[in-house]
Amino acid sequence: MEIFGIPLQAMLGQLLLGLVNGSFYAMLSLGLAVIFGLLNIINFSHGAMYMMGAYLAWMMMEYLGLGYWWSLAAAPIVVGAFGVLIERVLIRHVYKLDHLYGLLLTFGLALVIEGVYRDCFGVSGQPYGVPEALRGATNLGFMILPNYRAWVVVASLLVCFLTWFVIERTRIGSYLRAGTENPRLMQAFGVNVPRMVMLTYGFGVALAAMAGVLAAPIIQVSPLMGSNVIIVVFAVVVIGGMGSILGSILTGLALGLIEGLTRVFYPEASATVVFVIMALVLLLRPAGLFGRES
Amino acid sequence: MNTTLCNAVGTALVAIGLAASGAASAQAQSKLSGNAIRIGVLTDLSGLYSDISGQGSVAAAQMAVDDFIAANKPGYKIDVIAADHQNKPDVGSGKAREWYDTQGVDLIVDVVNSGVGLAAAKVAGEKKKLMINTGAGSTRITNEDCNPYSIHWAYDTYALAAVAGRAIVQGGGKSWYFLTADYAFGQSLEQDTTGIIKTNGGTVLGSVRHPLNASDFSSFLLQAQASKAQVIGLANAGGDTINSIKAANEFGLTKSQSLAGLLVFISDVHSLGLNVAQGMQLTDGWYWDLNEDTRKFGRRYFEKMKKMPGMVQAGTYSATLAYLNAVKAAGSDEADAVTAAMRKTRYNDFYLRNGHLRDDNRMVHDMYLMQVKKPAESKYPWDYYHVKATVPGDEAFQPMAASRCPMVKKT
Amino acid sequence: MASTGNRPARDFGLGLLALAVFGAIAPWIGLYPVFVMKALCFAMFACAFNLLLGFTGLLSFGHAAFFAAAGYAAGYALKVWGWSTLAGLGFAVVCAGMLGLVVGALAIRRQGIYFAMVTLALAQMVFFVFLQSRFTGGEDGLQGIPRGDLLGLIDLSNDLNLYFVILGVFLATLAGCYRIVHSPYGQVLKAIRENEPRALSLGYRVDRYKLLAFVLSATLCGVAGACEAIVFQLASLTNVEFVISGDVLLMTLVGGVGTLLGPVVGSFVLVAMESYLAQFGSWVTIIQGSIFLICVMAFRAGIVGEVIKFLQRRDDRSKARMAEGALPSST
């Protein structure tokens, strides 16, 4: 069976791979959106945090002999704690300033983190093995899908759903949303807003770190992996609507699929299609697909 | 007032002129600029090609310098400097320019990555200083982009196609699909291999281009799979080759189609492991386990780097030593004289078998068709290859008649 | 009053003169001309960028596109069409300006961070075009661009000859920036930067002013990009990458946003760091990042900005002292 002269098999395969990439976009842009929603900071160091997560997994394996599952639990906690520290020491001081300064600050931070890792590990990628339980592949008929990639989609959808549920459907989430709307009022109600902000930043970057651990067995663990993906993830957040939780998840997944489709018809453009969409969305619907016009 | 100023300026100019001519005559006497030779190793020290050249190449150049000094006790200083070109043509050519202009570099070697190699060769041509490329593969170095100061040493994409490529087509792999690194090297390799496939009765169904240093090959491999070609030709190198072979295994491509690594180095086989790489046919310009001489060099290098050298690293040694010997023979480090001395030499050493430097600046020497051993056949560490055939240089490299180099006079 | 009114002009004139003198002697005090040329090209680039960020308040993430486009245009005209150096330079500048018109017309419809994102998106599309087009040489870049000569008189393949030409172009560009900023048009731009709604309500057609500023900035970027390609005889993809847009922002920030000489100082500092710290490899990135952090946390005015602030404070103090000593009749 063929669609526009493209075998259906090939198309399904590319779409599935696109979904795997989309899962990463969704997790990364979710963290970015959460941070932007509450802190009004465009966290340029998000990619660096993602890279740190992957490297923590690699280092735990290399130096401590601790496997994948340990890293999946530990790396987000370590990176989250690092994020909390960064928020306290640096980011806290630029809330009152223009957006631009938060962006520049986190951009500088990303450079420093990336530079440190480059100095320690060089730019060439380090291989990281697929965990025992997820080795092998499943024949889906139209393609052979490595089990690990299927796991990535499931795991990230789960994490995204949980995050969405907590923010939109629980009491903690309602504090958070209220803090976004009117921090002063929340403070008056006795909520410790600075602490909430700090923990939110930690949570956002922990999500990035978890995405990093998930990505480690698929791509080479390299100091540049963060800066390779950060711009695309930015675009996802802008397309979805800055600060929109659901928007960032759905846009992330959709963008992965669109990239997959582009690979079928015009492979060279697959890395650029996201920017075309971003430009169009910004010009036609500036608040993003899921954002509210202010 | 004005006249005195003019006089002063005039005197100063004359003085500068005298000083300059004095310096020039001093140079002419010693024949060596600065009474020293400096060799620059311009390479990838941190990226995807650092295993095939990198620090190993720097060490090899230093070994050649040490050996030359030990054997000849020259009355001038020789040293080696190195820099990382980060696989960027602008960084590499900028470095070459700075080295020739300000560091007194007489020879640049290695220059792995064809994009960088071509850009840096332009600088060498303009500065009329020598560059011997032992790392990059594109045949453009000795064809469209040839110049008298850029020499191509170890291998090129034509030889890769003419040795292993031809063997695979003749062995029955008639329909091909390429996975090509999208820069000078990948393009040359795809083009040269396509030529060989067609003359041997095979067909090329298409190709997919991937960026240099791609992180994930899965989608490219799905495209290759959909082509239903018998052979998927990997027109890439180093880290890219390793990752594409790994991904092909992960996605089960190797069950129905066969992979042809068109440029596979021994370091690649080492990191892939024999389990994955076994049975693969490949072209090599040199192997450490060919004979007593190669083993001797291999072991010395191993002492330093804890790895066996590949054809690029050993090639850097070979080129550096050949250059120093040519400087000695010419009694000058002036590039034209050195090249002339090299052209007169017939090379037969641990690296070059039946080697000679052609007019298009191609170093022609015997190449080898290798097959990767099965894990059971490997008796000791780094025992990876069966030598299937030795291909004489004139068959392995592009014939002069087909040269596209303007330097070569067609008769 | 008259003397204070001329003060900026005099200061700028002195600065320009100092730069010219320093530039003229630089090759004789051990500075490698190619290095200084690189710094001068980036200084022009940063000045052009600052015209937009510092004097109009628009942050663009896509200026690498204009810089690189001019490089490719100049390279192609010189290498393939065999144009003279000046004609190639002119062609490149026009190309960059046209590209600036297209990008600017789309981007000025949005504000703040959204403006930055539109420029980023469009610059990435330009990157794609350059990566895919055969005329740019893709990853290998457009190599072997001839430097040519100046009006058939001066051979530019000589580094020193080219150096003085680039120095001249640089000084002219800087003077041009001064002219723009201190014109009535420049005053309107400043008004827009300070308070856009008020400028709008005063009857200024804000969008037209912004667009013109964008095009001017892109055009000057074109001068810088074309010069860089001619100096290095290479136009490569590195210049279209997002990193370059980040670098130029850092240069402007370090030197001082909204000051004329700031970007010049900033670009010299950063290019020097890149060249002389190169042997430390990744430490360059770490230091660059740290400078970003320090600038944002402590020195938001940048080097030149802080110097100006210091001088003003001293000025104010001495004025205050004079006022105290003076007779009350002066009031």
Image (cartoon, rainbow, N blue to C red):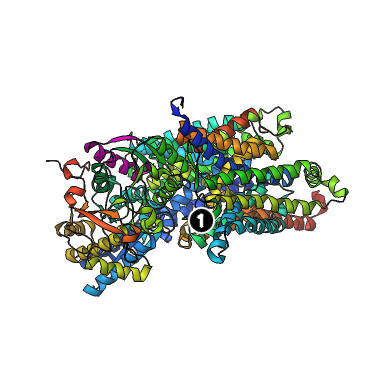
The residue under label 1 is: A128
Name the residue: 29% across, 58% down. B385
Relative image position of residue C257 (x, y in whole percent): 62, 47
- Report whether C108 appears left or right of B219: right
Instruction: Report in which chain the residue with disc 1 lies.
Output: A
- Report whether B102 appears left or right of A179: left
* Quadrant that contains the C terminus of chain B: top left
Which residue type does callout 1 highlight? Answer: Tyr
Magenta range: B179-205
Relative image position of residue B369 (x, y in whole percent): 24, 52
Q: Nearer the viewer, residue C145 or A16?
A: A16
Examine the rendering and report whether any part of residue C153 can be seen. no
Relative image position of residue B213 (x, y in whole percent): 44, 48
Which of the 4 image quadrants contains residue B64? Answer: bottom left
Which of the 4 image quadrants contains residue A90? Answer: bottom right
Residue C44 vertical placement versus C279 (above, below): above
- Binning the other alpha carbons within 10 Å of mark 1 as few (below 14), some (14 to 19) or many (20 upward) gives many
Relative image position of residue C187 (x, y in whole percent): 65, 37
- Report whether B357 appears left or right of A96: left
Determine if the magenta segment contains residue B6: no
Q: Nearer the viewer, residue B291 or A225?
A: B291
Q: Nearer the viewer, residue B185 or C147?
A: B185
- Report whether A266 appears left or right of B367: right
